[in-house]
Image (cartoon, rainbow, N blue to C red):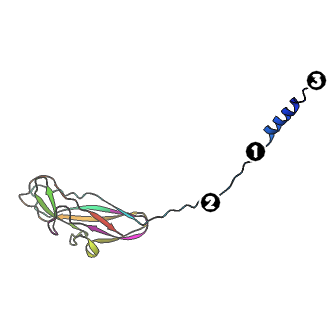
Amino acid sequence: MRNPLFIPVLVATGLLVAAPAHAQSNTGDMELLVEVINGCTVTATDMRFNIPPGAVGPVDSSATIGVRCNETTFFRLDLDRGENAAGTQRRMISGEGIYLPYAVFSNTARTSDWGSGFFGGRWGLSVGTLVRDVPVYGRITTVPASLAPGTYRDTITVTVEF
C-alpha cells in the first residue's frame, strides 16, 4: 500500500524546482556630461650661460618655452624681470651676493627685449593639442673683469595668457 501523502508532496516539490523564475526589471537613462575648459600649460628649459676664462662679452645662451593648449588658441607669453631685478635690469646673483646683469630677448638678433603685457610679451598660436616650442634668447653683454668664479642664478616667471 502506498502512502497517499507522499506522492502529492513529491509532485509539488518537482513543480517548484521545474518552474522558471520570473524577475522584474525597469530601465532608466543616465546622462553623461563632460565640460572641457579651454586651458594652456607652460614649461621651460633652463638657460645656462658658459663664461670661459677671460671672456669680456657678449656671452649668449638660449632656452625653450613650451606651450600646450587643449584646443587651437592664441596666447601671449609674459616674462617677469626675475627675482633679483633692479628696476628693469635683470640680474643673476651668486651665493656671495654678487650681481651679474643679463637680458632676455624674443629674437635671435637679441634686439627685442622680452617683457610682459600687450607690447612686451610674445604672441603665438597653439594648434590643437600640439606643444608649441618658443625660443628664448639670453645675453650677458659685459663680463666684469673682477667677476668672481661661482654659480649665478635667477628665476624668471613665465606666464601664458590665453
At label 1, the amino acid type is: Ala
Task: Provide the residue span drawn in magenta.
Answer: 66-88
Label 3 and label 2: CA atoms lie apart by: 63 Å
Return the residue nearer the eye: 94 or 46.
Answer: 94
- Give the residue drawn at x 66%, y 56%: 27
Q: Tell which residue pokes out farthest to the right in this image.
A: 1
Q: Which residue is mark 3?
A: 1
Query: Vertically, is 161 above or below 15?
Result: below
Q: Is residue 93 left or right of residue 23?
A: left
User: Is the residue marked by circle 1 packed among few (<14), some (14-19), or many (20+) residues within 10 Å?
Assistant: few
As helix, strand or loop, the secondary structure at mark 2 comes to loop
Residue 150 placement (x, y as % from top left): 13, 52
* Residue 72, picture quadrant: bottom left
Are the residues at dot 3 and dot 1 in contact (C-beta closer than 8 Å)?
no
Return the residue nearer the eye: 137 or 115.
Answer: 115
As helix, strand or loop, the secondary structure at mark 3 comes to loop
Q: Tell which residue pokes out farthest to the left in this image.
A: 146
Label 1 and label 2: CA atoms lie apart by: 26 Å
Marker disc for residue 137: none
At label 3, the amino acid type is: Met
Q: Which residue is mark 2?
A: 29
- Give the residue drawn at x 30%, y 65%: 159
Query: Vertically, is 7 above or below 90?
Result: above
For marks 1 and 2, the one nearer the N-term is 1
- Give the residue drawn at x 85%, y 35%: 11
